[in-house]
DNA sequence: CAGATGACTCCCA
DNA sequence: CTGGGAGCCATCT
């Protein structure tokens, strides 16, 4: 039961490179309104259930705390891609967080870029 | 139509 | 750090 919105979510998730992770909220903001973090999670669950779509690297989508939401299997898959978890099973988003889609690609498909992260880095650089 | 449920997030104690 | 509660909203009973 995949609607157009889910297709857009999958399209974005497929652009997260191996070895990188994005939060549900990040994916949601790239897809844009009216998609919310919650719906991104729903879309991932729907993909698992339906599994009719082409492959989706669902394991690269994690929660805002830098942890996986679906158990050990997801963590193993990520570790297999080179993502490192700390002692508390958290991922350093500074190091492994997705920086957002390629600007040209995003523009071509009507997606948004991720701004917040860079903005923060810029702020820190000023001092 | 009402209620329960989740691969979410934020906030506060 | 953990836990609970409040928003949240598509989907399913």
Image (tube, coloured by chain):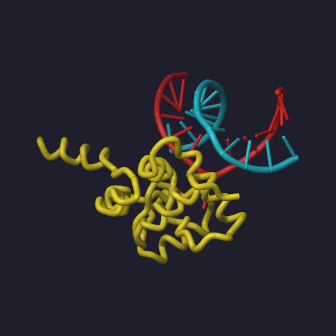
Chain colours: A yellow, B red, C cyan
Is residue A60 in sight in this rendering?
A: yes
| Frontmost residue, A117 versus A106 | A106
Numbered disc total: 0
Q: Please determine whether, in this image, residue A72 is positioned above or below residue C3.
A: below
- Left/right placement of residue A94 relative to residue C1 reads left
- Residue A100 appears in the picture as rendered: no
Return the residue nearer the eye: A106 or A23: A106
A17 vs A34, left or right, is left
Q: Residue at x 54, y 73 (%)?
A: A77
Where is A125 relative to A9, above or below? above
Residue lying at the far bottom of the rendered structure:
A80
A79 in relation to A66, above or below: below
- Residue at the left extreme, as displayed: A127
Q: From the viewer's side, name the closer residue of A53 and A123.
A: A53
x, y percent for residue A89 = 50, 60
In this rendering, position of residue A101 left or right of residue A62: left
Give the image location of residue A11, x and y in percent: 49, 63
Q: Position of residue A116 (x, y in %)?
A: 31, 44
Q: Residue A106: horizontal and vertical position, in percent?
A: 36, 58
State which quadrant residue A91 falls in: bottom left
Image point (40%, 66%), residue name: A20
- Quarter of the image holding residue A74? bottom right
The quadrant the C terminus of chain A occupies is top left
């Amino acid at each position: 039961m995949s609607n157009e919105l889910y297709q857009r979510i999958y399209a974005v998730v497929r652009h997260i490179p191996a070895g990188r992770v994005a939060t549900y909220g990040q994916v949601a903001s790239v897809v844009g309104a009216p998609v919310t973090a919650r719906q991104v999670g729903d879309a991932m669950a729907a993909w698992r259930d339906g599994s009719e779509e082409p492959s989706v690297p669902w394991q690269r989508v994690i929660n805002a705390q830098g942890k996986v939401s679906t158990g050990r299997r997801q963590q193993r898959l990520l570790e297999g891609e080179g993502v490192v978890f700390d002692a508390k099973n958290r991922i350093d988003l500074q190091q492994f967080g997705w920086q957002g889609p390629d600007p040209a690609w995003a523009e071509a498909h009507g997606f948004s870029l991720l701004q917040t992260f860079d903005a923060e880095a810029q702020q820190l650089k000023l001092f």
